[in-house]
Image (spheres, grey):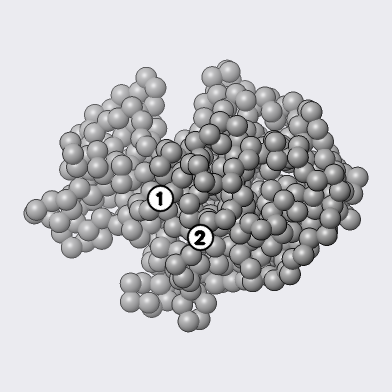
Amino acid sequence: MHLSALIEMIESGFADRELLGDSGRRVTGAGLGALVGRAAVTLHGHRALVYAGENHPLLPVALLAAARAGVPFVPVNYRLDDAALNALVARQPEALVLADAATAPRIAAGANVLVFDRWLERLPAAEPPVEALFDEDDVAVVLYTSGTTSTPKAALLRHRHLMAYLLNTVEFGSATTEEAVLVSVPPYHIAGVANMLSNLFAGRRLVYLRAFDPQTWLAAVGEQAVTSAMVVPTMLARIVDAVVARGPGAAAVPTLRSLSYGGAKISERVLREALTRFPEVGFVNAYGLTETASTIAVLGPEDHRAALDSPDPLVRARLFSAGQVLPTVEIEVRDEHGRVLAPGESGIVFLRGEQISGEYATGSLLDARGWFCTRDLGRVDAEGYLYIEGRADDTIIRGGENIAPAEIEEVLLSHPAVAEVCVVGPPSQEWGQTLAAAVVLRPGAAVTGDELRELVRTRLRGAKTPETVVFRESLPHTDTGKLLRRAVLADLTAG
């Protein structure tokens, strides 16, 4: 199925319902369809639509216009330096490039660049017919990986992947006319694309936050009567800190009913504080990857609240799981030899299903039977809950033993003084790799490196105890919340 079908469903199903806009302009489903049709005409002769800018109230017009015109939508990270940004733009020849006013001048001469607002203002007055043959196997969206360990790769999501995700996870028109979602994740992240499409499919009004700030986020929830939102863990941590700074008691967000998070590991302190400060909000942990067209596993509100106060340690542990895999997605956990492991055994996570792409511009990573290797380490318990234990590429090999940094980090984060931690493996002539931890303390807290090392030794064992513990003011992250382990490793190796 092709995204052009989604456009038709929005036009007919939500003709008079407000779906987009800000205080200056509101757009109904019928109005969105008309804008998309007029915008698609401007893409004639172009091979792609590149978007290089911050969130915009009418951003969905760009993605849907690309779909209607039969060309890929390619959002790129406008926060990159000029050289990296232009390198990504250059990888889409003969594209129309839409940018915000601050980013447009940074794009090299030769590219066909328009400021997004000017493009909207200059759309044709009428909607001429667009000659496009819709094929669900065409590429709908190209997303560049964050490049935390290497040069960004172009992940390809075809129309059939995105429509499978929508049809299998969202009920069309399930939102009421009063519902609104606050989107603060950037447009070049899979969560930004998925939020856009899934909420339009449900009929929910989209409220875009141009740039994230916790105070602005809290204000927007109140001013726009937001009922749901999605954030990455670093955003949730800053929101919780902002609420705590205002004093005791629950956050003043009377309309908010659902808050989903995902994309990186979240600390126990942040999550428990969030559940306490937002007592009427249903929390959802959504696990997925760019290559899986967004969410493939969900930990829902009931599981969050049940785990928060349960006397059963197995139920409490679910608070830090990715939840249960969607019924439309198959999962296997395999060892390094490809053997499928039993429930509870840790290995590498493989996925298969209609929404799984597993494809890059350089080729597909699906095996002969359609399975995609996520490179995530994890396990599935007897009740079907998925636990992600880190990346296979992050594994530290010390003296011939494979050690997952996430296991050590979880212990260190349990100390009340620790706000954030990253464990890496600097090279060692004796052991191959050694263990080193970079730690960020909570404001006003104090603990020594020896105390933290003893905590790990007590909970785990000597072989998993960091030889080195260093303290830092902050740790490097991508702007979507992923920890930049290679930058931490470079820092500690140089030190």
Front-most of residues 278 and 256: 256
Residue at the (64%, 71%) spot, across then down: 137
Q: Which residue is mark 2?
A: 155
Return the disc, 1 or 2, that comes first in the chain's sequence.
Answer: 1
Front-most of residues 31 and 45: 45
In the image as oriented, which residue stretches furthest toward the right?
16
Front-most of residues 63 and 237: 63
Task: Classify 6 as above or below 270.
Answer: below
- Label 1, label 2: how far apart the Cα atoms are: 12 Å
Residue at the (25%, 55%) spot, across then down: 396
State yes or no: discs 1 and 2 in contact (Cβ < 8 Å): no
Q: What's the residue type where badge 1 is placed? A: Gly
Task: Classify 441 as above or below 80.
Answer: above
Q: Quadrant of the N terminus?
A: bottom right
Q: Which residue is mark 1?
A: 147
Task: Classify 443 as above or below 452.
Answer: above
x, y (%) of residue 151? 38, 53
Q: Quadrant of the C terminus?
A: top left
Residue 213 disc label: none
